[in-house]
Image (spheres, rainbow, N blue to C red):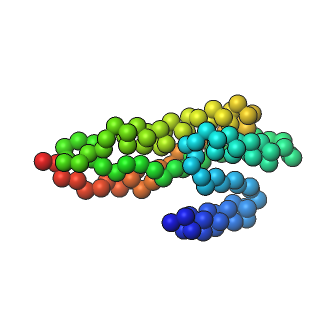
């Protein structure tokens, strides 16, 4: 699966570069504080010459428990539910905070958050 991500990411990077823009992808456990800190430091390093701000932050994490919330024999448990919310939702706030603190975002910057296919496709479940 990682190879497929890497191939798609490389194609997207090429398209972005082809239109005269730069990109920086982080393919790691993006909910970890150390990963975020290292990535923000790298972004700051890359944006020194010429100085600038990040025009777009794309937060796209594929993570989550796909069990029903209720009404089935096997439902999501507290740990799975809280971990999903932390990785898919809370980490977006932490990334934005870190970018703002590092001076990487200014008025007019855009923030996009995406989810995995679970955000657009319902998995069939049977409620008893």
Q: Nearer the viewer, residue 92 or 22?
A: 92
Rendered location of residue 19, percent (x, y): 73, 61
Q: Is residue 77 left or right of residue 39?
A: left
Q: Residue at x 41, y 48 (%)?
A: 64
Q: Is residue 125 left or right of residue 10?
A: left
**Residue 98 visible in the picture:** yes
Identity of the residue furthest to the right in this view: 49
Q: Residue at x 67, y 62 (%)?
A: 13
Q: Say how many tags the image has.
A: 0
Q: Nearer the viewer, residue 75 or 89?
A: 75
The answer to which image quadrant residue 57 occupies is top right
Identity of the residue furthest to the left in this view: 128
Q: Residue at x 23, y 53 (%)?
A: 125
Q: Nearer the viewer, residue 116 or 71?
A: 71
Q: On screen, 102 above or below 74?
A: above
Q: On screen, 122 above or below 75?
A: below
Rendered location of residue 65, percent (x, y): 37, 49
Q: Is residue 85 left or right of residue 21?
A: left
Q: Residue at x 38, y 39 (%)?
A: 79
Rendered location of residue 49, percent (x, y): 87, 46
Q: Is residue 119 left or right of residue 34?
A: left
**Residue 106 visible in the picture:** no
């Amino acid at each position: 699966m990682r190879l497929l991500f890497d191939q798609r990411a490389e194609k997207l990077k090429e398209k972005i570069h082809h239109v005269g823009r730069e990109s920086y992808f982080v393919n790691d456990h993006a909910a970890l504080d150390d990963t975020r800190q290292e990535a923000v430091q790298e972004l700051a390093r890359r944006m020194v010459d010429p100085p600038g701000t990040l025009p777009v932050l794309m937060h796209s994490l594929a993570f989550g428990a796909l069990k029903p919330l209720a009404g089935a024999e096997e439902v999501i448990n507290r740990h799975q539910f809280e971990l999903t919310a932390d990785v898919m939702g809370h980490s977006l706030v932490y990334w934005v905070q870190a970018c703002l603190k590092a001076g990487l975002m200014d008025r007019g910057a855009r923030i996009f958050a995406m989810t995995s296919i679970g955000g657009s496709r319902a998995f069939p479940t049977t409620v008893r």
